[in-house]
Image (tube, grey):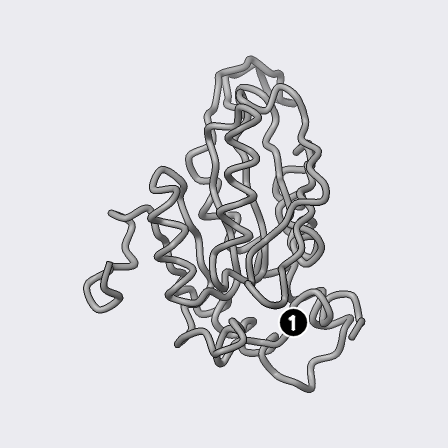
Amino acid sequence: MSMSTFAFTPENNIFVQTHPLIQHKISILRDIHTGTNEFRQIAEEIAMLMGFQALEDLPLMDVEIETPIEKCTTQVLAGKKLCVVPILRAGLGMVNGITALVPSAKIGHIGLYRDEVTHEPHEYYCKLPSPIELRTIIVVDPMLATGGSACAAIDFIKARGGRHIKFLCIIAAPEGVERLHREHPDVKIYIGHVDRELNQNAYICPGLGDAGDRIFGTK
């Protein structure tokens, strides 16, 4: 599929953020002078702002409660609890932003590492709450580069029965967005910003560096 004709639109299940607060905070993340503590905090804040849109279709059910004034019928979240699945390790930096919105959410984990030569992902850990097939699943990873890790993670979730899946990332390369949409067109993709391209080492440009290193203060 030609990148010149591929549209990053809701019709393709792709939601690119335009909110000024998200764009402002992404600029802080990009800055080489932003330290570990601030980077971690801002990543959580972006995840929370993006999660607000991504969770707008959570199902509700009516319940009866008593206010200090009278009894009334109101609405609460229905069904099995939301599941947040970070792709280790950088995805952990977005989890608290989502659970700040839904504290009762269950948390799964998928561990992948990228081959330095082929850039393809390899699984080393996968643990998901049960029953996964009845939950809305939010997969989080700050970066969507080649799309290999995101596609592999969603493959693993689907193989274990997951069906209602969304993917949240802060920065994406066009190549990764196209691949994820091509391999999983049913998955809604929420993106903070689509960057220019991948370089020869499969790093997003201009990007923000290695998100895992910057979140955890490692090199």
180 horizontally vs 76: left or right:
left
Let me know if residue 45 appears in the view.
Answer: yes
Expressed as whole percent of the image width and height from the top left, the position of residue 112 reads 66, 50
218 above or below 11? below
Q: Is residue 160 left or right of residue 217?
A: left
What percent of the width, then of the height, locates residue 96?
Answer: 70, 50
Residue 76 appears in the picture as rendered: no
Is 43 left, or right, of 195 in this rendering? right
At which x and y percent is residue 1? 24, 58
What residue appears at the point 63 percent right and 61 percent down from the top-left corner? Answer: 115
SS under mark 1: loop
Residue at left 61%, top 74%? 29
- Quadrant into which the C terminus falls: bottom right
- Considering only vertical position in the picture, is 22 above or below 166? below
Disc 1 residue crowd, few under 14, some 14–19, many 20+, Cα 10 Å: some
Q: Is residue 148 above or below residue 74?
A: below
Q: Determine the residue positioned at 69% across, 81% down.
A: 34
| Residue situated in front as seen by the camera: 48 or 149 | 149
Q: Identify which residue, 12 or 95, lies in the foreground.
A: 12
The residue at 72%/41% (across/down) is 125
Query: For the image shown, how many numbered marks are present on the structure?
Result: 1
In-front residue for pair 168/204: 204
Given residues 111 and 171, the one toward you in this image is: 111
Return the residue at label 1: 210
Which residue type carries mark 1? Asp
Could you say where residue 197 lies in the image, as x and y percent from the top left? 41, 75
Task: Describe residue 93's horizontal placement relative to residue 186 as left or right.
Answer: right
